[in-house]
Amino acid sequence: MTTKNLLVELFVEELPPKALKKLGDAFATQLADQLRALGLINGDSVTTAYASPRRLAAHVSHVWLKAADKAVQQKLMPVTVGLHADGNATPALIKKLQALGADVSNPAAAVAALKRAPDGKTEALFYDSLITGATLDTGLQKALEESIRLLPIPKVMSYQLERDCALPGWSSVNFVRPAHGLVALHGSTVVPVKVLGLTAGHTTQGHRFEAAVSPVVIADADSYADTLRTDGSVVASFAERKAEIARQLAAAAAKVGGGCTAIDDDALLDEVTALVERPNVLICQFEKEFLDVPQECLILTMKANQKYFPLLDGHGKLTNQFLVVSNISPADASAVIGGNERVVRPRLADAKFFFDQDRKKTLASRVDGLAKVVYHNKLGTQGERAQRVADIGALIVEQLRNATVPYTAHAKDEMDVLASKVQQAATLAKTDLLTDMVGEFPELQGIMGGYYARHDGLRDGVAIAIEDHYKPRFAGDALPRNHTGSVVALADKLETLVGMFGIGNLPTGDKDPFALRRHALGVIRILTEADFSLNLDAILANAARAFGSMLELWSDKERADFAAHQPKLQDFIFERLAGSLREQGYSAQEVDAVLALRPQRLGDVAKRLAAVRAFAVLPEAPALAAANKRISNILKKAPEVDAHVSEILLLELAEKALYAAMQDVAPKAQAQLAQGDYTASLQTLAALRAPVDAFFDEVMVNADQMDLRLNRQGLLKTLHNAMNRVADLSRLAA
């Protein structure tokens, strides 16, 4: 039996653009998966998804007209249950065979056809049967219904059917949008399936305005895309339309000249691809006077409201020209261009109005207004939040001040200036939430604060900090550009994390409404990449202190819960750090070894990992890691042992040699550790391999004599402490 290619298309009203790609991929994948499960396609089959604003389709190659019959063996029951002592079938066996469709008119013959085989400790009866393979019409019907049921529809619509139903005008179905056509072709043959009140055929509709014919007749499965392109003026493939739009955008930008490029936004490109069936990129422009408005505002309004592509010059500055992806291609496009220019002008005028109005009030004059904006019912207002951020920022600066060595007069002046700028930036950072521009475009919070701060004549460092205090906003985003911004950003994220953890608003599964995972990663990046001399436990404790005045208003239970949740926050941060490090290419063993010690200076983690990686390739590493693991296991059983060794009680040559080696090696390793040379510290410890191996070969740790046992355990404790200052080397053991 030969195979043919299959084409299935659902023709619908305009699909939600942000969900189109996902819907198209899911429809094709689910359809193929269902057909594969039914045995109608095999591993050689290739599935191609099609998705345009008004259709979901799938092309599946090498589809059988009928699946192969399948031999199946089913376990029935134990012999003792299915057969009497005389070998005749029990009623239970007869009933089971009847349920499986077996012929039981002659029970003896039916029993004789069964197989006996061991099943664990008992002997069981097995029934061999042949399952008839599914035919394409019944199989596709089932596959299509299941594919529609499993579609990730963001919001389901219910609508009434007009025909092919029990009660026209009353019978209803549920789908993402009303469906108006169904194509199902196996080669050139229509497969007689029905779904959503539609009967499959071989006709569909093309472009609303530019189709050459209506309806568009699809001759066979393989001609679907080409026929839609030529007769329907529709590029059915989402990927092809996206590539064509990208090509046209680049060509239009080159035509404008001056090194211009269309703004790079893959999400916008996907959305526009989902809005057009045959793209046509046009060049438009607006009045240059609007360029006085911050370009972020203009870009956002053009992208978000109009789905336009702003053009940036060679220096990344916005030009007064933009690109429109039209769904029609008239001979004279001037009317389309003019229409889009008229549409965008009021949006830009609104942005200019908001900008002009906002600048009539200073950021400082808006501070009191934050007290009227609720942040969270348990955490107070935005005004209280801003004060906590300022307090946390002050504590961070104080920690940095204490960590500055040597603390010269110049260093003091720098810290005094930093403290002043942090206080000012933290106090004003949230005030742009009260501006008209941010009210219209929440995505601009922080950015507009920076612009308004400069307009108010504030120091540039403060303006930059206000603008950057939300950074990093997403994976791969830049860090704040100055120390002030880094401190305020760190304080802001810590306030959110400590507060939300304190009231029990922890992320669950994929739900993280307050973006706590992103905030934790932001804290990690600032502490590691900015390399602040800050201990994680100290800054978390100081951040919790900033909530002191609020905690006084809480009940005893709420205060107790707040305190109980704080240790979970450090675990949460280290979990995020571990995941981030693995993504960077470090092995799970390396990460586990370093983070097992909970290093509080996150800026040192990279150096510790490099040291562990360098240590792991040494010939002494496996033996020392295994010995370390052995020592850890011994000490777990003797938790009260302290790191104390009496030389008088060192009797065996091997323990004396190990103690002597430690007296020589450990101080050197510790000195290298203190200097931050973690790699050298671990490599120095490698010299202990021989005496450690000899110790375990020749010395009985758990001696009968208590003082000897405790002394040897103390020796191991001392060794364990010396070896595990950079990382827990036992985690490297195989």
Image: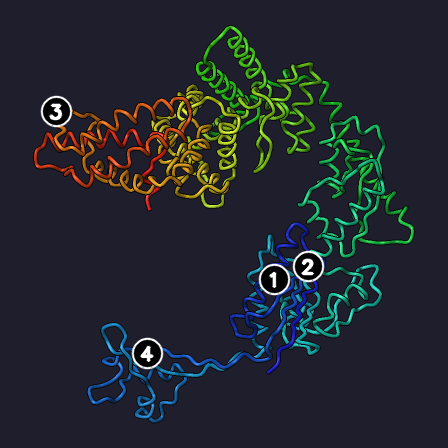
- Nearest to the observer: residue 313 or residue 148: 313
Q: Residue furthest right?
A: 332
| Secondary structure state at the residue bearing disc 2 | strand
Image side of residue 623 versus residue 58, left or right: left
Classify mark 1: residues with Cα within 10 Å, few (<14), some (14-19) or many (20+).
many
Q: How many marks?
A: 4
Q: Which residue is mark 3?
A: 648
Residue 142 position, x and y percent, is 56, 71
Whether pointer 2 and pointer 1 mark residues with C-beta atoms closer than 8 Å, the reply is yes
Q: Write down the residue under mark 2.
A: 51
In what quadrant of the picture does the N terminus appear? bottom right
Q: Which mark is first along the chain, 1 or 4?
A: 1
> Considering only vertical position in the picture, is 299 above or below 666?
below
| Label 4 sits on residue | 76
Looking at the picture, how far across and down is residue 268, in whole percent?
69, 45
Q: Earlier in the sequence, mark 3 or mark 4?
A: 4
Amino acid type of disc 1?
A: Phe
Element marked by disc 3 = helix
Q: Is residue 684 visible?
A: yes
Of tags 3 and 4, the one toward the viewer is: 3
Nearer the N terminus, badge 2 or badge 3?
2
Among the 4 quarters of the image, the one containing residue 262 = top right
* Mark earlier in primary sequence (2, 4): 2
Q: Which mark is residue 27?
A: 1
Q: Residue at x 66, y 17 (%)?
A: 460
Using the numbered discs, state the Cα–Cα distance from disc 2 to disc 1 in whole angstroms.
9 Å
